[in-house]
Image (tube, helix red, strand yellow):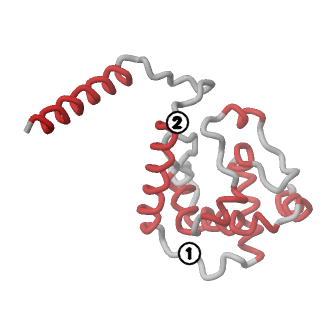
Amino acid sequence: MRLLAIVGALAILIGVGAAVFFFGGFFDVAENVANPAPIDWALATVRAASVARHAAEAPPAPANLSDPATVKAGARAYATIGCVHCHGGPPDADWSKFSEGLMPIPADLKVMAKTRTPAELFWAIRSGVKFTGMPSFGLAGASDDQIWSIVAFVKNLPAMSDADYKAWTATP
């Protein structure tokens, strides 16, 4: 019984301490200050679990995300709606200097193309991701078809050449 009382008291003390730390303004929300490792771990773990769970709500993907026309349309949409500013593209693609100051650092889409399912990519692009700076392009007016074309582009990004990307995104 005494052990339970001690565990309960510790839980209350930890809860009060966490409340004082976060609500008392001691947690530094400045973007140029690194988060404590447990906070980064918790955010990354919650983010991954949430994306995996909610990606099941994504509408079915088009039949062929490898279709060259869909990939080209995705490259144009990717450049037009601004994805390239934070995530870059093929190695020489333009990106905005401000993306160096984003925390967490924008995802490397060449890695995401290999580790995320099309449904997870679709969900993240359409819904946005809290606490990362990733906006909801669904709220910004991108259609599901446009988002799926961006998913097709991202899934094909690791094998894409700079020349292809530049040709596909060049203004006619």
Mark-to-mark CA distance, 1 and 2: 36 Å
Q: Which residue is mark 1?
A: 61
> Which residue does the image show at 10% across and 34% down from the upper left?
2
Kind of residue at disc 2: Ala
| Within-10-Å neighbours for mark 1: few <14, some 14–19, many 20+ | some
Horizontal and vertical percent for residue 19?
31, 25
Horizontal and vertical percent for residue 147?
60, 62
> Which residue does the image show at 33% across and 27% down from the upper left?
18
Q: Looking at this view, is 135 or 110 the one in front?
A: 110
Say above or below: 48 vs 156. above
Horizontal and vertical percent for residue 134?
57, 45
| Within-10-Å neighbours for mark 2: few <14, some 14–19, many 20+ | few
Say above or below: 166 vs 57. above
> Which residue does the image show at 44% across and 68% down from the upper left?
56
In the figure, is residue 35 to the left or right of 21? Answer: right
Q: Looking at this view, is 171 or 169 the one in front?
A: 169
Q: Looking at this view, is 168 or 15 the one in front?
A: 15
- Residue 21's tag is none
Q: Tag 1, which secondary structure?
A: loop
User: In the figure, residue 12 lies in which quadrant?
Assistant: top left
Kind of residue at disc 1: Ala
- Split into 4 quadrants, where in the image is the C terminus? bottom right
In the figure, is residue 113 to the left or right of 28? Answer: right
Q: Which residue of the protein is positioned furthest toward the left in this rendering?
A: 1
Q: Which residue of the protein is positioned furthest toward the bottom in this rendering?
A: 63
Q: Mark 1 or mark 2: which comes first in sequence?
A: 2
Q: Which residue is mark 2?
A: 37
